[in-house]
Amino acid sequence: MPDRLFRSPSEAPAGIVHLGLGAFFRAHGAIYLAEAMAAGGGDWGVTGVSLQSPGTRDRLRPQGWAYQAVELGPQGEAARVVTVLRDVLVAPEDPQAVLDAMAAAAIHIVSLTVTEKGYCHEPSTGRLNRDHPDIAHDLAHPLPRSAPGFLVRALQARRRAGLPPFTVLCCDNLPENGRVVRGVVLELARLIDPDLATWIDVEGAFPSTMVDRIVPATTAADLDRLEARTGQRDEAPVMHEPFRQWVVEDRFYGLRPALEQVGVQIVGDVTAFEHMKLRMLNGTHSSLAYLGYLAGHETISDTVADPVFSAFVQRLWRNEIIPALTPPPGEDLAAYADALLDRYRNPAIRHRTWQIAMDGSQKLPQRILGTIVEGRAAGRDVPGLILSVAAWMRYASGTDEQGGPIEVKDPLAAKLAAQWARDPARTVANFLSLGQVFPPVLREDAAFVRDLTAALAGLVQKGARAMAAEPSDG
């Protein structure tokens, strides 16, 4: 029986609390933080918080919070042990312990990777969803459930204790994510305590960020393979591609790690980087996920190995996405697209189309719909992106092209399935009525409605691969 991976837990204090301790943060931000401590010093260990279940905590605790991050390159694997975690809390078990950790004087940053749906907001507007059950709970109880609720109540505790606020560092795929999270937090704080909201408004820091690394789900086979290679059993490794990028707005309250010493780009404005990544990577990832899944492809690498989808995604970049972008300083968007295609083709990254397809109602507005709105306003045709929206509708129906069931993981899954009708025009009208997803400008655009209806009818009649194969150069 192999030994379990283990290190003695560090007694050094944490300087960061991270909400949403999933695979992405452990394969991205945690590694940067470990390197920043090694390069620039400081107590920047992390107290992780699981907002839903104890699974991650239970796998990591017997290992002293250590785990392996495994780089999956075309030429093979390389593993490293990451020891930046100091503790892991489970919010539903003890929300007060989470608030106490966030309110501690040693904490300077609270970072988040809770996915788009974790902010309890309306993706089409960015406003707080006051009807969300977790927000309704947090307005009625001092011990919160939601990520915005924990931020507000922890900041409230710090203010009462005479401590400064922590920096709120959102690391999720939201455009202008710092602004969005600040708006949600202020809106919730005003409903709880207007004076608290004023304090957060004046003193708080919410830098925007752009994060990039492909992190496929870890499988049981990954655990067994890693054990055979290392002779140690790690129940909580993470897999990731070689590429990584982190761009952070220089807007912190007080201390921060020496991130710039380990390759993090500290900039005055993240917007151009956000748009580049959200639309060129996340937008095409979602497009390939819905179309690829419908066409029977299990992973993104499988999908782009199909010449139809390889050509399709390159048309998206060239004709529809890049023309809507302003290049960030020092970035060549055509070269970035070429690099993305190489990353997608990496056969070692088994990033499942089903995994990327999750939570589409929360992802579509910032990943695809924003580019459509801008393209149509500028008089550009966007047939590939419209086909991607139609593919999401087809996928969200819960039935694949062969009539088999699709397990749709989305906070609006039941509502989405109910929008499907036999008639494509009726289906499109039903979906466009979802104000949480579609902005009025698209619902009122007759040409967009016409083109979306035609794309959906084509998907039903011909299938995803045939539709993606049709030229869309205009």
Image (tube, rainbow, N blue to C red):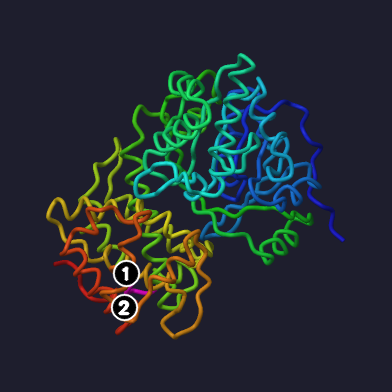
Q: Which residue is painted at 66% across and 21% down in the image?
A: 106
Specify whether residue 307 is painted magenta: yes
Q: Which residue is painted at 49% across and 32% down in the image?
A: 191
Pointers 2 and 1 in contact (CB under 8 A)? Answer: yes
Residue farthest to the front? 140
Q: Which mark is residue 390?
A: 1
Amino acid identity at mark 2: Leu
Mark closer to the chain start, 2 or 1: 1
Q: Main secondary structure of the magenta part?
A: helix
- In magenta, the rendered stretch is 306-311
Question: Label 2: how many residues lie within 10 Å, few (<14), some (14-19) or many (20+)?
Answer: many
Q: Please state the horizontal and vertical placement of residue 375, each as a whole percent of the image.
A: 19, 54
Q: Please state the horizontal and vertical placement of residue 467, each as a whole percent of the image.
A: 28, 77
Give the camera-side residue of 416 and 229. 416
Q: Please state the horizontal and vertical placement of residue 120, each as a whole percent of the image.
A: 49, 46
Q: Quadrant of the N terminus?
A: bottom right
User: Residue 417 falls in which quadrant of the image?
Assistant: bottom left
User: Residue 397 falls in which quadrant of the image?
Assistant: bottom left
Q: Is residue 335 left or right of 242 when viewed as pictured?
A: left
Amino acid identity at mark 1: Ala
Q: How far separated are the C-alphas under marks 2 and 1? A: 8 Å
Q: Is residue 271 left or right of 40 when viewed as pictured?
A: left
Q: Name the residue under label 2.
A: 459
Q: Which mark is residue 41?
A: none
Q: Which residue is painted at 52% across and 18% down in the image?
A: 254
